[in-house]
Amino acid sequence: MANMSTLTLGEVQFWYHARFTHRGGFIAMLHNLFRWQKGRQQSGYEKMLLAGATWPIKFDLYLLRFPEGCEVPPHTDKVDSGKHYRLNIVLKQAKSGGEFICQTPIYCSKRIKLFRPDLCEHAVTRVNSGNRYLLSIGWVRD
C-alpha cells in the first residue's frame, strides 16, 4: 500500500471503505460503542453497546437502562438464522415495577434471566419508581 501521507482524501476514503465496511458493520459497531441509544422497542429504555463481534460467534453485550415510566410490550426478537440466546443480569432493580416477564425462560431467578428471545415472547412491566439497570449478553448459534 502507498504511504498514507501521500494519498488524496478520496483515496483515503476509498481505502477506508474497502478495508472496513465489508466487515459486517464493524464501523457501525465502533460508532455505537459506549453511547446511549434508544432501545429497539421505542418504549423508553436505552441501551449502551459495550462489546460485540460477528466471528467466531455472533454476540453483543449491552448495558440497559429502564427509566421511570418506561415499559417494554410483549414481543419476540427474530433472527435471520440460528438460535438466539440472551442472558440478562439485573444490576439494579427499580424501586417499583420493571419486572421481566417471559413465558418459557431457560432459567429465571430474581437477578438472572436466560431465555430464547427469538422463540419466547417477553416483556418488561412499567417502571413505576426508580430506574432499572441490567447487563444483557446475547448470542446466536447455528
Image (cartoon, grey):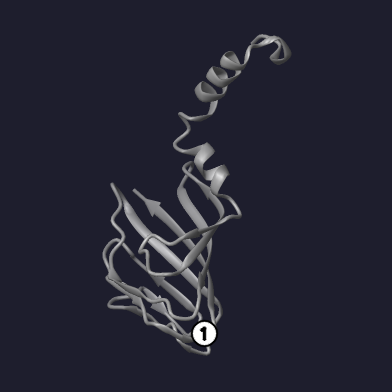
Residue 38, x across and y down, in percent: 46, 60
Query: Which residue is found at the position 44% from the left and 36% from the top?
Result: 24
Residue 26, x across and y down, in percent: 51, 38
Q: Residues within 10 Å of mark 1 (few under 14, many from 20)?
A: some
Q: Is residue 3 found left or right of 133 in the rendered image?
A: right
Which one is in front, 67 or 21? 67
Query: Which residue is found at the position 27% from the left and 78% from the top?
Result: 103
Residue 30, x across and y down, in percent: 57, 43
Query: Which residue is found at the position 45% from the left and 29% from the top?
Result: 22
Q: Is residue 13 found left or right of 120 in the rendered image?
A: right
Helix, strand or loop at disc 1?
Answer: loop
Q: Identify the image quadrant of the N terminus.
A: top right
The residue labelled by disc 1 is 94
At label 1, which amino acid type do we have? Answer: Ala
Which one is in front, 51 or 65? 65
Q: Residue furthest bottom?
A: 96
- Picture layout, residue 141 above or below residue 69: above
- Picture layout, residue 20 above or below residue 130: above
Residue 118, x across and y down, in percent: 29, 61
Q: Is residue 110 found left or right of 15 in the rendered image?
A: left
Number of numbered discs: 1
Which one is in front, 140 or 37? 37
- Picture layout, residue 13 above or below residue 75: above
- Picture layout, residue 49 above or below residue 115: above
Query: Which residue is found at the position 33% from the left and 65% from the top?
Result: 116
Quarter holding residue 108: bottom left
